[in-house]
Image: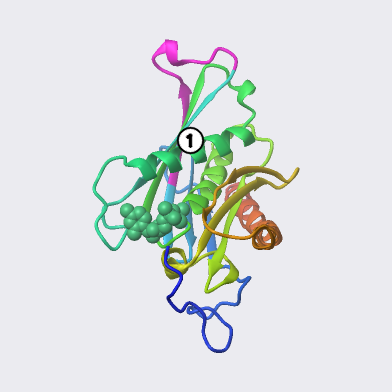
């Protein structure tokens, strides 16, 4: 991350015209993959991500947990989802994202209700524009709920960071590339438990607190979009 590129306009707004605590637009849809047990599509700014969830008995048998389910999220970027073609196959970054998403989802799922099961969460990034791990996790949580998997809560996430020395919500690609810090965070909103928190860059304690409180303020709005996505699918089906 470089600190010397101008990311704020003279009028105090960000390069894309947003205010410091303004999110990009988000749209979430469920039931988008017919053969999956659950699925979701999220558009978060220019990010486009599809998630398909399959619940089955873990195989081979020795990989099963006799008293609870295993959650395996696999984050994958399409080759042309980014400016410079992404080489196919897993790399350190995609393995890391798969791991943190799996762990965050595991905190929300009532794993003991599905002994011996494996919950496969396939995440396909069709277009990436900063914040894909959080958008993936937010959509995955909806897709898992859509699969009917028992959950304590819907994991919801958001990113904040530092650009041109200012704390900003939901980093754009430029802010992510040229800003001074990137802080993705996800919580279980019912209890406020933090299930993902990463920090790339440098912030003071005061800036960190400002970033987390900005994210906490934004979480309820994203949670509402998640719930609406699930409710609109079921209300349409029920009404027909
Ligand atoms: O996507 P997220 O912000 O969670 O993770 P990141 O590692 O901070 O990546 C930031 C952004 O860099 C991604 O959202 C992509 O837009 C971009 N990227 C890329 O252009 N090429 C890659 N191979 C990986 C990421």
Q: Quarter containing ligand 1? A: bottom left
Residue 114 percent location from the top left of the image:
58, 22
- Could you say which is closer to the camera, residue 110 or residue 215? 215
Residue 188 percent location from the top left of the image:
68, 44
Residue linked to disc 1: 37
On the rendered structure, is 218 left or right of 101? right
Q: Secondary structure at mark 1?
A: loop
State the image quarter where residue 106 is shown. top right
Q: Is residue 55 magenta?
A: yes
User: Is the residue 125 above or below the residue 214 in the image?
Assistant: above
Q: Which residues are magenta?
A: 51-67
Q: Which residue is outermost to the right?
A: 191
On the rendered structure, is 78 left or right of 113? left
Residue 154 visible in the snapshot: yes
- Could you say which is closer to the camera, residue 166 or residue 222? 166
On the rendered structure, is 47 left or right of 12? left
The residue sitting at 24% across, 56% down in the picture is 85
Q: Is residue 85 magenta?
A: no
């Amino acid at each position: 991350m470089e600190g010397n590129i101008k990311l704020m306009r003279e009028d105090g707004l960000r390069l894309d015209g947003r205010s410091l605590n303004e999110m990009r637009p988000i749209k979430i849809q469920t039931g988008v993959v017919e053969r999956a047990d659950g699925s979701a599509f999220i558009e978060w700014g220019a990010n486009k991500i599809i998630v398909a969830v399959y619940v089955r008995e873990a195989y081979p048998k020795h990989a099963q947990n006799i008293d609870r389910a295993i959650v395996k999220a696999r984050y994958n970027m399409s080759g042309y989802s980014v400016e410079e073609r992404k080489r196919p196959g897993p790399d350190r970054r995609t393995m890391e994202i798969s791991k943190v998403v799996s762990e965050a989802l595991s905190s929300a799922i009532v794993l003991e209700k599905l002994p011996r099961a494996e919950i496969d969460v396939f995440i396909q990034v069709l277009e990436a524009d900063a914040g894909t791990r959080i958008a993936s996790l937010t959509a995955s949580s909806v897709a898992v709920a859509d699969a009917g998997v028992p959950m304590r809560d819907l994991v919801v996430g958001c990113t904040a960071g530092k650009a041109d020395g200012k704390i900003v919500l939901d980093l754009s690609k430029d802010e992510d590339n040229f800003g001074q810090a990137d802080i993705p965070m996800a919580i279980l909103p019912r209890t406020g438990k933090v299930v993902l928190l990463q920090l790339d860059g440098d912030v003071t304690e005061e800036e960190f607190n400002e970033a987390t409180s900005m994210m906490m303020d934004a979480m309820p709005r994203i949670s509402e979009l998640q719930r609406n996505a699930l409710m609109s699918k079921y209300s349409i089906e029920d009404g027909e």
